[in-house]
Amino acid sequence: MLKDLLFPKKCLSCQTWGDYLCPDCLNKLSLVKNPICPVCFRPARYGKTHPHCLKKDKNSLDGLISIFLYKGIIKKALLKLKKNYLKDLSSTLVELFLSFGGENKELSRLIRRKPIFIPLPMTKKEINYQGFNPHHLLGRLITQNLGIPFLDQAILKQAELKENSCFSEYNKAFLINEKLSFKGVSEVFLFKDIFKNGRDLRVCAKLLKQKGVKKVWGLTLALDSKKT
Ligand SMILES: [Zn+2]
Ligand SMILES: [Zn+2]
């Protein structure tokens, strides 16, 4: 394609010309082999929240599915995508997510139930600064491929947060969109790029469950390896 001649791509890891992720580096991808509970971060079968963790907070996430470890080429690709809106890089990441995610039995089982995809929101200031919302961009592409519903603006974010912000700051930062009705919405995938401390996802899960949503799973492309 002409575009490839004008804007030649280099592998983000080994710098070989051709693509953002060359076949050799793709073979070295780190997958999440030991899923964790999104509440206590201890190993959990299929990423399902431990019953005792959910008992303490029934409005928390019901589970977490992350496909890649946040390191190596996936980390480089996500950092590059955050710096620049690169349509072909986002498509490559989504293709990888779909092909490796397709091997995850729990994810396939949940997708067959046609959950609604809700991307994690960003504040207007964050979107203006970054130019786009990566959770929205990647999430929408995934749902277009899978043919499942995507609901934007279900949750709004009104304040910026840091990784060390406390739980009450997270609580105040997110709001449910009262203009939407959640009647009949029973299962949701809350989608974002990386699972870090999970506070954002747990707070958003609570907002949705307070509106009557029965199951809310976190779904992320990557899992910060510090948590495993
Ligand atoms: Zn490479
Ligand atoms: Zn747990």
Image (cartoon, rainbow, N blue to C red):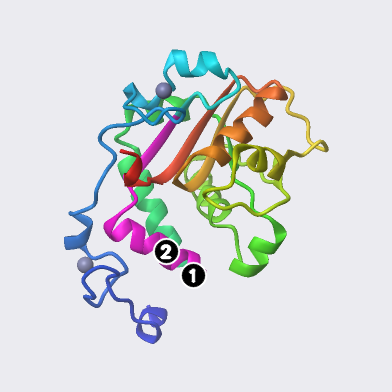
What residue sits right under mark 1 in the picture?
83
Q: Secondary structure at mark 2?
A: helix
Tally of numbered tags: 2
Task: Identify residue type, mark 1.
Answer: Lys
- Residue 68 magenta-drawn? yes
> What element does badge 1 sit on?
helix
Q: Magenta region: which residues?
A: 64-86
Q: Residue furthest bottom?
A: 6
Q: Is residue 197 left or right of residue 140?
A: left
Instruction: Look at label 2 and name its amino acid.
Output: Leu
* Label 2, ligand 1: CB separation under 8 Å: no
Relative image position of residue 63 (x, y in whole percent): 46, 27
Residue sitting at 54 percent across and 16 percent down?
Answer: 56
**Residue 222 rendering spot, x and y as whole percentages:** 38, 47
User: Which residue is located at x 53 percent, y 48 percent?
Assistant: 164
- Left or right of 142? Residue 15 is left
Label annotation for residue 198: none
Do tag 2 and tag 1 residues touch (Cβ < 8 Å)?
yes
Decide: is 88 above or below 36.
below
Badge 2 is on which residue?
79
